[in-house]
Amino acid sequence: MQQDVEGENMGKYIYSPSRNLFYPVALKAVYEHAGRWPEDGRVVADDVYREQTDVVTGENETAEIARERKLAEISRWRDEQENAGVIFEWHGHRWDGGKAARSRLSPVTAVAQSGALPEGFFWTDVDNRDVRLTAEELVQLDGAMLQAMVRRGFKIHERQRQMKEAVERLTGTEEINRFVVGWEGDDE
C-alpha cells in the first residue's frame, strides 16, 4: 500500500485498514455526504488494488461494499426529497412550499412586516389563482409553509432512518442490492 501514488499508476482507490475495504476515489463526495468516507484511507496504486481484489474475495467484503453504496443511495434520496417542493393547504387554498418557494416568500414577508406591501398585493396559489393577502395573512402563510416543511422534513428523516436501519440488518449482498429506496406504500 502507498500513501501517495504519482504518475500513470495513480490510484483510483483508497484502502481503509480499519475497515479492510477499498473505496473508489470517484465516489468520495457520495461517501462523505453519507458520513462513510474512512479517515484512515490511503491511496493505492491501481495494480495493488487489482492484485488485492483478485486475492481478497468473499461475502463479507462484498456485502459491506453493497451496504455502503445502498446507504449512500439513501442519503441521496433524502437530499432529493428535502429539496423537492411540498404542497400544503391554508385558508382554503393549496400552496406551493419548500426551499425554493420559501426563498421567494421570505423577502416579501420582510417587506410585509415593515408595512410596505404594494396596493392590491396578491400571492399565487398552486392552482395558479391570485389570492389577495394582507401583510398579516402573508406572515401567516409563511408560518404555515414552515410548518408544512417541518412536517415533511420529519417524515423524510423518519423514512431515511428506517431504511438505513433496515439496510444495516441485511447480511447478504443480493438482499442489500434488492432493497428498494423510497417511500413505502402511500407515504409519498
Image (cartoon, grey):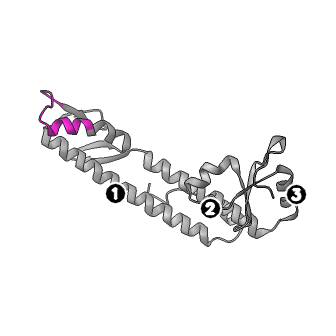
At numbered mark 1, what does the secondary structure look like: helix, strand or loop?
Answer: helix
Q: Is residue 67 above or below residue 81?
A: below
- Report x, y in % for residue 19: 70, 67
Q: How many numbered dots are placed on residues in this image?
A: 3
- Report x, y in % for residue 82: 43, 50
Residue under numbered circle 2:
179
Residue 91 appears in the rendering: no
Residue 51 bears which disc, if any?
3
- Report x, y in % for residue 149: 34, 51
Residue under numbered circle 1:
151
Residue at horizontal 44%, vertical 57%? Answer: 156
- The quadrant in which the N terminus is found is bottom right
Mark closer to the observer (1, 2): 1
* Residue type pointed to by label 1: Arg
Residue 111 bears which disc, if any?
none
The residue closer to the viewer here, 123 or 49, is 49
- For the residues labelled 3 and 1, the Cα–Cα distance comes to 50 Å
The residue closer to the viewer here, 186 or 133, is 133
* Residue type pointed to by label 3: Glu
Q: Earlier in the sequence, mark 2 or mark 3?
A: 3
